[in-house]
Image (spheres, helix red, strand yellow):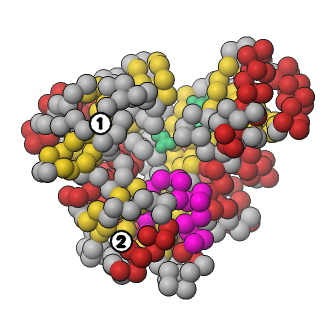
Amino acid sequence: MNILILGSGGREHTFAWKISQSPLCDKLFIAPGNAGTLQHGTNLAISATNFLALKQAVINQQIDLVLVGPEAPLVEGIYDYFKADVDLKHVAVIGPSAKGAQLEGSKAFAKEFMAKKNIPTAGYQEVTLATLSAGLDYIDQQTPPIVLKADGLAAGKGVLIIEDKATAKQELKAMLEGKFGAASQKVVIEQFLDGIEFSVFVVTDGHHYKVLPIAKDYKRIGEGDTGLNTGGMGAVSPVPFVDAALMKKVEERIIIPTVEGIREQALAYTGFVFIGLIKVGDDPLVIEYNCRMGDPETEVVLPRLKNDFVEVLIALSKGQLDKIDISIDDRSATTIMLVSGGYPEAYQKGKAITGMESVQDSIVFHAGTILKEQETLTNGGRVLALTSFGNDFQSALAISKANAEKIQFDKKYFRTDIGFDL
Ligand code: AMP
Ligand code: GLY
């Protein structure tokens, strides 16, 4: 079959790398892709949210399956667009409908979804300008820190954790008055949860589900989890503190009711549920849902998956996940992100990347790169992810670090302490 991957980051290069290993894939396309995805298929210069141009490409290239990487096309309804079009409805789309993508696209929707299924999560109050006074009262009842979340997508910036009530009240007003545009016209105020985070990835069609390897990402720019939030500076899989007893609770209290909720609420879902969890004491609670795979978590999750990934995607699209046994590599995988100096604030693009050929024993996944006149240049904040295997995450990390030193580009930066808190 012919497959199209949508997106251009490290997650999508990892998808392309894994799919290209499958005998079931004839031709592979990536829209828009990066310099790394070119190693495995053909890049199409089409944005992942340009549905009309994607439709033409899918028809022209006789695409049978579309794997959606980022959340934006899902929240904008790419699944529904395909299913409503007579020329496209036969194409399998891996990802939820717009309604299902609300699990990520609206924090209020996700909270109501969890409440209906008694899924453990932080207590909350939903607020708009019309109910501001109730929101201010709710803040008064909390013990700081106070967590404020813009309801809609805000490029990863929509969550504020505030140490005092007075500032929280000011910020709540600023958010409702448009600090994050339409995304914060509604705000979810949440109880602060104190614990350690990890992520679970589930593939589901709303009936059957399979659990992929567990991971933990490191979002802060600085060593020791300091400084600004980024899209993710590195990740490990598995996560040593997530033992069988904790996973049993995650499955019984969170995964099973989530899949049931998707079915009961008829959310039309054939894709990934990325569940951001926090362990408080011995118990798991949900911090957030995403309707896609994580980045850079994918760069450690997929290399540990032994299955033919295309076989899994086909079973998912046909509602036959029960026929698949997931097989996972016992080794640990660690990835380190090499980023452009300045990221996650202003940074420069177009810097030549050298030394990739001297990398040994790591997989080089491209994130923000572009090939211009035979030269690989930086083209984003997150540039490359280096994934290595080891008997534990520390030995995998050591290999990635050694290779991170061999790659050069102007103002390269990376964290050396991925997994420091494990
Ligand atoms: P989110 O975008 O919902 O993943 O939130 C971003 C980050 O904020 C999470 O990864 C957590 O580190 C933190 N966070 C979100 N909600 C809470 C909460 N209720 N308690 C503590 N930390 C939180
Ligand atoms: N690494 C976090 C995310 O993909 O949302």
Is 84 located above or below residue 46 in the figure? below
Q: In which quadrant of this rendering is ligand 1 seen?
A: top right
Location of residue 172 in the rendering, given as x and y in whole percent from the top left corner:
76, 27
Amino acid type, residue under disc 2 in the picture: Ile
The magenta stretch spans residue 73 = yes
The kind of secondary structure element at disc 2 is strand
Whole-angstrom CA distance, mark 1 to mark 2, is: 30 Å
Is 41 located above or below residue 36 in the figure? below
Q: Residue at x 26, y 65 (%)?
A: 42
Location of residue 193 in the rendering, given as x and y in whole percent from the top left corner:
67, 27
Location of residue 198 in the rendering, given as x and y in whole percent from the top left corner:
51, 37
Q: For this rendering, which residue is in front, 416 or 239?
A: 416
Is 283 located above or below residue 57 in the figure? above
Frontmost of labels 1 and 2 is 1
Q: For this rendering, which residue is in front, 246 or 394?
A: 394
Q: Residues within 10 Å of mark 2 (few under 14, many from 20)?
A: many
The magenta stretch spans residue 398 = no
Q: Earlier in the sequence, mark 1 or mark 2?
A: 2
Horizontal side of 170 relative to 133 (left or right) equals left
Residue 249 visible? The answer is: no
**Residue where numbered disc 2 is placed:** 3
Q: Residue at x 66, y 54 (%)?
A: 102
Amino acid type, residue under disc 1 in the picture: Lys
Location of residue 410 in the rendering, given as x and y in whole percent from the top left corner:
21, 27
In magenta, the rendered stretch is 66-81
Quarter of the rendering containing residue 296: top left
**Residue where numbered disc 1 is placed:** 349
Horizontal side of 28 relative to 152 (left or right) equals left
Q: Residue at x 20, y 50 (%)?
A: 371
> Marks 2 and 1: in contact by CB < 8 Å?
no
Horizontal side of 79 relative to 352 (left or right) equals right
